[in-house]
Amino acid sequence: MRMFLWLALLLPSLAVSQSRPPLPADYYEKFQVQLPVGLQPTDSVGVARALQTVADAVEKLEGEAQTRYRISDTTQLASSYMMRALAALVQNRFTDYHRYRRMAMRLQPSPIYILPPTLVPMAWSVAKQRVPDEASAAFRPALRLALRQQLDSLPALTRLDLLNSQKGAYLPAMTTLVRGELRKILSVAAMRGNKLTYSAAAGFMRMGFSGPFYQRHRATVEQLLYELDPARLVDEEAQIPMRDGVKLHGLVYRNGATSGRVPVIVSLSPYPGGSEATQGNVFATNGYVYVYVDTRGRRKSGGSFFPYEQDAQDLYDIIDWASKQPWSDGQVATTGGSYLGFAQWQAIRQEYRHPALKAINPMVAVGFGVDFPRESNMFYSYILQWATYVSGRELNSAVFNDAPFWNGTFWQLYKNRLPFVKLDSVAKLPNPFFQKWVSHPDFDAYWQGILPKPADYAALDLPVLTITGYYDDDQNGALYYYRQYMQHATAANRGKHQLLIGPYDHGGAQWAPRAAQAGLPIERAAQVPVYRQMLQWFDWVLKKQAKPAWMLDQVTYFETNAGRWRGASSLQALTKDTLRLYLTPQKQPNPKRAGLLAMQTSVPKKTQSIRYIHDVAQVLDSAFVFATPRPYDDSLYMTSAHNLVFESGPLPRAVTVSGALLPRLFMSLNVPDADFRVTVYEQTADGRSMQLATSGLRTRYRRSATNPTLMKPGKMERLDFNNNFLYVKKLDAGSRLRLVLEVQNTPMYERNFGFGGVVAQERATGPRLIETTVYTGRKYPSRVDVPIGE
């Protein structure tokens, strides 16, 4: 009876919700809130007043989003409630804070291995309700009690790791770090007329709350953490000598209670964030010394920084130093993700490989020249954003996170059809990193001279644990190294390389994935602490402990939509069969798109052609090019007038996509070069659209990334879109597959106008038509190959 009553109450609200329009894609981009002119982080009274203004604006924004619009995505709705909770917190509206927090946590509970982001603020709010005056003698005991109750509720499995990671978050230096972040936010706001964007407003509220909290209560929290777990952690600074006389700044984290020598884990990083101890302490309390080193030219490290160019020899010298310290047992391993993953592959180059290096753990590793700063041999606009982020001594985080500034910069270059090489000039942020990279459009000696050689992989006899994710931006980079190793390593050594891959994004695959990855909720079985798996692997290879149970084979992977982990002897072993879907010019009835074309499982008997024309110099609508696709929504690509869309019939039975999809299209062009993108979606029987694969192709590189060959206009050739990500997913019976083909025309990439010269230096002054003919039939079987597992 209760359930029926609950449903009766809920159904009217659901009906109202369904009648609302969906939340506009650019809803948050239009937000801005005015700050007082000249506001400084040291002005505590002024910052406190501004916090109230910002919180009011955020509460109004999120309240209207939830009442006027339909937010069908639970991840986005949970985020909206968390922003309302943050706004309520800084305004001491504790009833609202608790209500919004509960709603957010119900929509998206934190996995047990992640400290709930509201744990400490929750304890503070409870203490404030009991003792409103923070300056009174009674507040500190009230805070200790509330915080202890929160910490005692942590799950036993990960409680000690969470406690020790928080010891790193409450060091004395954190007060200075928070003030520095607030200063960066205010400096960027000043450049924008003292206006905060949505993301900057979130950062301002977090820093505005954290600054006073750290100043008043940091020592109280730290003392309690040590009472709950007395492991005495030592963090020390070190100046590590390099062969050229430069000294690099290192942070050493070790367990003060450990008197013996232990293995050392090293990371070399260009990201001096200030919170390295949160992970360093976990290593230290699990039997290792962790050494985090700033690349040369960053933070307190000497020398000058130029990304990717000197990490190999520096890592040799770092490993040499670490192996000789009194707390080291002589074994050194490496870990880290993204740039830190790239750096580890530098350490295996024969001329720079140190004998003390015993294992490497590259996660989501950047493939320099492979997937950064180029993807499918095409430069993308984000590379300037990243280059700005790491220019100078400290992270330019506020500028980096200023999405409206970057979108506006990319748009100015795009709408004026300017050469891509001018991007840093348009941004008024001249950058030597950017300029050097775009001067090497081919996969030439510059990129090849930095990456490991075949002989380096052949000589590698160390254990390797590669970790990446289906949604990892650098999956192609991570798997580039893996495939190079498996191709060139000896038969005896191939078994030493383990690969772990699951439904994780770039951040989630590096430490502890949240319940949503790339904006999509992931299955409970995939919510595992990646760092724990990595520690178990280190215990196995460095301490000779038991082989980790999670290692099901050389490749351990997660089958999404089936909720299970599986093992395979190799990437090739994932695929047992291939489903071929052939493109046809036949119309497929669909109410959303009159020009929908069909894909079929049999080869069309006669040769036919499909003509596709796009003016690549056309400036598309900004709302369209900057729109973020809503989860499960197909409206962007289905209503576009600038693409071809093909759809298969419904799958007669469930199948598991198990590998990288491969579109093979027979095409001719009217120009010597063009950039294309092919994206494949699953369309479920209940109407949800989910991306399975996307790959770009610059046609001059269809045969080789090193030796470009221009197309002969009018000549048909087979073009393979072979840069798709590996993905393992069970597709239910009744699902259809859709293939979208389009000329790439977006502010997010350099624009190829098809002249055949150096793309980054070209511009268009008028229309530039790319006329494409796609051929189908027995002689020219344009198709997409779908790898199928068991």
Image (cartoon, grey):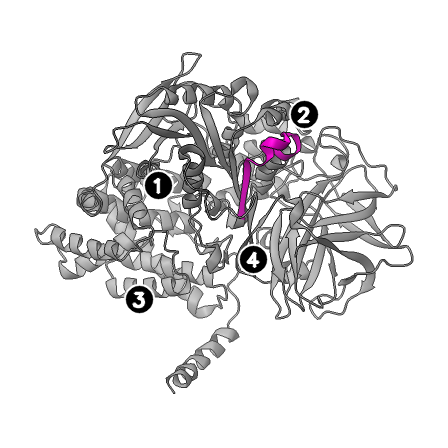
**Disc 4: CA contacts within 10 A as few (<14), some (14-19) or many (>=20):** many
Q: Which residues are magenta?
A: 485-501
Q: Residues within 10 Å of mark 3 (few under 14, many from 20)?
A: some
Counting residues from the start of the chain, the first of labels 2 and 4 encountered is 2
Gap between marks 3 and 4 measured at Cα: 33 Å
Alpha carbon separation for disc pair 2 and 1 = 42 Å
Spatial CA span between label 3 and label 2: 57 Å
Three-letter code, disc 4:
Thr
Position of residue 66 in the picture relative to residue 489 (left or right):
left
For label 4, the SS is loop
- State the residue at coordinates (43%, 82%): 7
Residue 190 location (% of width, % of height): 38, 40
Residue 490 lies in the magenta-colored region: yes
- Which marked residue is nearer to the observer: mark 2 or mark 1? 2
Q: What residue did someone put label 1 on? A: 186
Q: How many C-alpha atoms fall within 10 Å of the one at disc 2: few (<14), some, or many (≥20)?
A: few
- Which tag, 3 or 4, sits closer to the chain's start? 3
Q: Quadrant of residue 161?
A: top left
